[in-house]
Amino acid sequence: MKAITVEPGRAASARLEEVAEPDAREGSVLVEAVAVGVCGTDVEIVDGNYGWAPPGASRLVLGHESLGRVIDPGTSGSLAPGDLVVGIVRRPDPVPCPSCAVGEWDMCRNGRYTERGIKQIHGFMSERWRVEPEYAIKIDRSLGLLGVLLEPTTVVTKAWEQVTAVGQRAFWEPCNVLVTGAGPIGLLAALLGTQRGLDVHVLDRMESGAKPALVRALGATYHAGAIADVGFAPDIIVECTGAGAVIADAIKHVASGGIVCLTGVGTGGRVGSLPIADVAADVVLRNNVVVGSVNANKRHWYKAGAALARADRGWLAGLVSRSEPPEQFARALQREPDDIKVVVRFADV
Ligand SMILES: [Zn+2]
């Protein structure tokens, strides 16, 4: 079968090639790939800056945002041929640490977790893949191709759970949320904000195009510019850019008692000579919390599936902005101005 593979650590090593059928040890559920979403992590891996091949192998099958159709449900009691499924990305570390031991592998303490298509387990960019029944999430059939949005939705589902957990440390009645960054993560964070009944605002650099239109179609407010200019102090800021200046502004402008949830992973981003003790004093005096959130566990995958199933299909379809065949995977990894979520398309739904 055909697969898109890469030699981690070596730039420009990605290629579409013929590989063996998936190993039965990868799980009893056999799946035909429908689509795989691409994100910044895939670009980092293809650029040779991230990623690990499975033990004893030199190449890794790329792809972690899956959508497939069950060919053989294996030992799964609940799946049937033809069901649409998405594979969970992370597996607990082998020790396991206390978090992994209770199924919260997203909170892994020792970093020895593995991840499909990223860290030591093959990903989903192959014509067929296998998955353990307990790591296969069945999605609402009416979502069709939009099921490929499940993985990024799990990331924001966890982020919202973190925000809620932190908020409930005291009396808390949030009215509004500002999401910084209108990429797939930001837009899905905004969707979940509207599902929670909040007044949702989204800030990005783009002044026109699909992003402002998608935000307005949610019933949310779009802002192009700086956080200082949005005209209110947000109760919650979900930060999805990873840009130093935006993070600094988020911490500075969040409301008293407010929460800044960081989901973006950037580098550098030095912001002038930020007086860190003054920043901390403000955070202390205003009871602010800055919390980081990464990955997702099975509870978040389940809740994300329910959130997508509730969402407007037309709006979700607007997020999948481009689809490329496997032969054109390199084009899928190249960022174009109007891209939101680009997918590699293996088969029709
Ligand atoms: Zn762990």
Image (cartoon, rainbow, N blue to C red):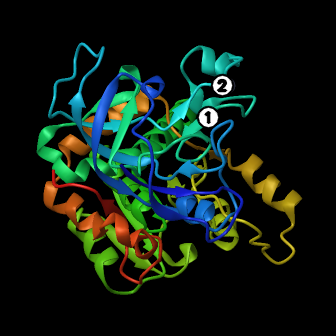
If you read the primary sequence from the N terminus, does the residue marked by circle 2 or circle 1 appear first?
A: 2
Residue at disc 2, secondary structure: loop
Q: What label sits on residue 114 in the rendered view?
A: 1
Q: Which residue is mark 2?
A: 93
Residue at horizontal 70%, vertical 62%?
49
- Secondary structure under tag 1 reads strand
Q: Between 280 and 140, which is closer to the camera in this rendering?
A: 140
| Residue depicted at 39% across the width and 20% down the height | 134
Q: Quadrant of ligand 1?
A: top right
Taking the image as shown, residue 288 lies to the left or right of residue 61, namely right
Ligand 1 under 8 Å from disc 2 Cβ? yes
Question: Dots 2 and 1: beta carbons under 8 Å?
Answer: yes
Above or below: residue 209 compared with residue 69 = below
**Quarter of the figure with residue 166:** top right
Determine which quarter of the picture holds residue 107. top right
The one nearer the camera, 117 or 16, is 16
Q: Is residue 166 left or right of residue 146?
A: right
